[in-house]
Image (spheres, rainbow, N blue to C red):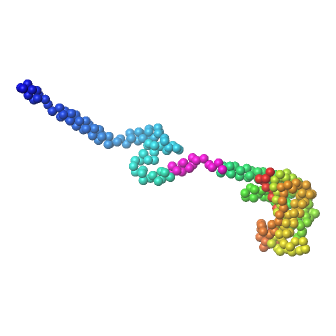
Amino acid sequence: MAKEKQEEEIKTDGWKDTFSDLMNLLLCFFVLLYSMSNVDEVKYAELVASLSNSFSIFSGGAQAVGEGTLVSSGATQLSNLDEFYTDMGKKAESDVEEDPLKQYEEKQMQKKKDDTEEIYSQVVEAAENSRLQDSLDVTMDDGYNYVMISLSGGVLFKSGSADIQSGAKQIMSGVGSLLKRYENKRIKIEGHTDNVPIKNSKYDSNLWLSTARAAKVYEYLTKKCHVKSGHMEASGRGEEEPIASNKTEAGRSKNRRVEIKIYSDTD
C-alpha cells in the first residue's frame, strides 16, 4: 500500500504542458497575422503586375487578377458592376459575327452598284463617241437600279404631237445603236409632259399624249433600229413626275421629255 501511494505522488499535471504548447502556437499565429497586416505596397504592386500578366480569363484580354475590373480595386468595385457588365456586353456584341443574310444583302447591293456604274460609264462613252452628249442626259438613280437616258420632248416632237420629227431621227438612230448592247436588260421607255392642259382630235389629255410619245419611241427603236423588244416596255406618266417647276417656260420645257431606263439587275 505504501508503494502505490508513493507512485501517485510522483505524477504531474501533463495537460498543462500541452496547454502551454497550444498557447505558444496561438501566440505565434496571431503575431504572424499582425505582421502580415502591414503590406508593402511596392511588393504588392509587383505581385499584382506579375499575376495580371499570367492570368487572362475574359475574351478581349480582360484580366482576372491585378488589372481585373473586379479584383484589383477590391470591394469598392462592386458599386461599378453595372458599368462592368455594360462594357463586357459591348465587347461580346462586337465579337458576334454579322448576320449571314445581312452580309448577302450587302454583297448583292455592292454588285448592283458596280453593274450600274459600269453601264453608266459605257453609255456616257458611247454617247460621246456618237457625238450625242449635247442631245441627251445620262444619269443614275440613287438606288443604283438603272441608268437613264433623257431626251428632250421639244427636240423629238412638235407641240401636241407624238410623231418623231425628221431632225430627231439621227439622234434616235444613235440611241438605238447604243441600246443594242443592252438587249438582255430590261429597258423601260417613259413619256412625260408639262401640266398645261391639252385636248385635240388625237389626245384627250397629257396622259394620252405622253403614252403615245413613249409608244412612238418604242416603235422607232424596234422597227427602224432593230432593237429587240423582249425586255422593252413603254408607258406614259403625263404631268405626274415633273423634274422642274411648271411655273416657267424653261421648267415646262424640261418636263416635256422621254426617259429611257436601262435596268442593271435583269439579264
Count the numbered circles shown.
0
What percent of the width, then of the height, locates residue 218? 87, 60
Q: Looking at the rendering, which quadrant does residue 248 occupy?
A: bottom right
What percent of the width, then of the height, locates residue 7? 11, 27
> Which of these two is toward me, 204 or 71?
204
Q: In which quadrant is the N terminus drawn?
A: top left
Residue 91 among magenta residues: yes
Residue sitting at x 71%, y 52%: 109
> Which of these two is toward me, 27 or 17?
17
Is 131 located above or below residue 25 in the figure? below
Q: Looking at the rendering, which quadrant does residue 192 occupy?
A: bottom right
> Which of these two is toward me, 107 or 116?
107
Is 197 located above or below residue 31 in the figure? below
Residue sitting at x 47%, y 39%: 55
Q: Is residue 214 visible?
A: yes
Is 94 located above or below residue 137 in the figure? above
What percent of the width, then of the height, locates residue 253? 83, 68
Residue 54 in the figure: left or right of residue 210? left
What percent of the width, then of the height, locates residue 203? 87, 71
The region drawn magenta spans 87-101
Secondary structure mainly formed by the magenta segment: helix
Residue 176 among magenta residues: no
Is 242 located above or below residue 65 in the figure? below
Q: Residue furthest top?
A: 3
Residue 234 in the figure: left or right of residue 55? right
Residue 22 in the figure: left or right of residue 199? left
Residue sitting at x 40%, y 47%: 74
Q: Is residue 153 visible?
A: no
Residue sitting at x 13%, y 29%: 11
Q: Residue furthest left?
A: 2
